[in-house]
Amino acid sequence: MSPAKVLKLLDDPRCSFTIVGLAILLRVFAALVWQYQCAASGVTLKFGDSQSYWTIAHNLAVNGEYQYGSEESRIFRAPVYPLFLSIFAWCEHSMIGGLAQTPFVLAARLAGCVLGGGIVWLLMFWTRQIAGPRAGCLSGVLAATYSGAVGMSIFVLSEAVATPLFVLSCWMLWNSTCRCRQTQDPTNTERAGLYWSAGSGVAFGLASLARPSWGLWPAVAFPMLLIASNRNNGNTLALWVKIVCVFLASTILVMAPWWIRNFAITGKFVPTTLQVGASLYDGWHAGASGSSDENMEFSMNMMHRIVQEEALLANDAGLGLPLESTLEWRIDRRLSQEAWKWARENPSDVAKLGLVKFVKTWSPMPRAQELSNPMIRYWEAGGYLIIVGASVFGLYVLRKDRRRLTDAVWFALPCIYLALLHMVFIGSVRYRQPGVLLLCGLAGIGFSAMIEMVFPILKPDWASRQKDAVGTTRE
């Protein structure tokens, strides 16, 4: 088949279904290989985080108790991913009665593969709305084959559920203003924007309850939401306020049951988990390297210190003293306080660590020992560099098209957010993957423009409509 015919196939919207199918098949194959490698190593779950999620899911499915280890660890993980895994843990207990048996763990991985295919489809659809079918299909090819995206689907980690929810939330929030620019009726414009915002808030609330690191995303998204609005419309600010309020209200409704449950346990407001203090201390303490290389042993050390201190105080008083909240909450509070204290006393070390974490997170070659396979490392590095390079070119191509440039920046915004977040918390290639996956949308636009430069006879998938788009924006 000639290159021209291949490129014309990319213009066919039906190409999307083929790409999604290939994405799922690739992930299924990778899941089978990964499970085989785990079995060869004598384990079913290779990551400690995976084991904790599965243990909570097992306790929930078998005993109806949401806890990890003991009653002192009832807010150890956010609930959405353990709830998702509890389906497989319940089947496992009903049929076998064991814990983390290979067939059921593999089933959870395969479910993640299907969700990963869903992300690829949504990303293609979103890119196609901005820049046409060719750019959409190319973004899908990148998202389908990028190793980081494949890994998020097959590892038993919260990204398998959190990333689809986050991408869905971003797309809906983008729609809350982007749809408005294409509607002539102001009433329908506002109503549509509020519906999209409500859906985005629901998806965001679930994403935050799957991966708490997304919790601060609105601080970045809301300013971008205002910039993306049609400034020629006198009601832009009022509509933006309504969209933000609806988004926050729907987010609160989704997260409120978890907040109420946590308050009933601790008597305190706990928005996500009681591991935030530990995560912060992991990134900010004397001897920190920027990675989580101490296996969180400081949490156990802190627990022993607090128990000893409370015992001494009780002995000195001669009576048992009332303690604030639960031991889990007190450990989290102390770790958080000590992390902030160290950061205030060592600002230069905080700045140096921030740069170290940035390099660890955004370096092309992953450093994690679990990914020591050279093939995976080069696959990750190569795909990452291609996506970043094509994204930069995509921004360059869109520089004169203000409307599409503003829309396409949504694909890059999560990378900025994750870069800032993980200059505070620990740095790892794992934490950049959702951002790089979204960046595939912008990379697809860049590759589409490259193709148009090489094969001018195709003439542009998106640039041919540039005048119309600019005209719509300026109405």
Image: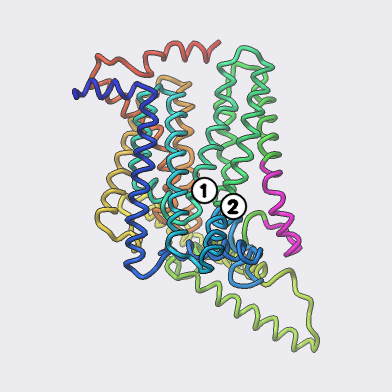
Q: Name the outermost residue toward the left.
A: 2
Q: Residue at x 25, y 24 (%)?
A: 6
Q: Front-most of 28 and 98?
A: 98
Please provide percent x and percent y for residue 185.
65, 13
Q: Front-most of 346 and 450?
A: 450
Question: Could you tell me which secondary element the residue under label 1 belongs to?
Answer: helix
Look at the numbered discs 1 and 2 and tell me whether their residues touch, using CB distance below 8 Å. Answer: yes
> Is residue 291 rendered to the left or right of residue 453?
right
Q: Residue at x 52, y 47 (%)?
A: 162
Residue 212 appears in the picture as rendered: no
Identify the magenta region.
251-270
Question: Which residue is identified by label 2?
Answer: 80
Q: Residue at x 48, y 27 (%)?
A: 407
**Up-down relation of residue 149 to residue 276 (above or below):** above
Protein image colouring: rainbow
Please provide percent x and percent y for residue 445.
37, 28
Please provide percent x and percent y for residue 430.
42, 53
**Up-down relation of residue 306 to residue 276 (above or below):** below
Type of residue at label 2?
Val
Question: Could you tell me which secondary element the residue under label 2 belongs to?
Answer: helix
Res 266 quadrant in image: bottom right
Tag 2: Cα neighbours inside 10 Å, few (<14), some, or many (≥20)?
some
Question: Which residue is identified by label 1?
Answer: 161
Q: Quadrant of the C terminus?
A: top right
Q: Residue at x 70, y 84 (%)?
A: 311
Q: Is residue 352 magenta?
A: no
**Up-down relation of residue 296 to residue 157 (above or below):** below
Tag 1: Cα neighbours inside 10 Å, few (<14), some, or many (≥20)?
many
Q: Quadrant of the N terminus?
A: top left
Q: Is residue 253 magenta?
A: yes
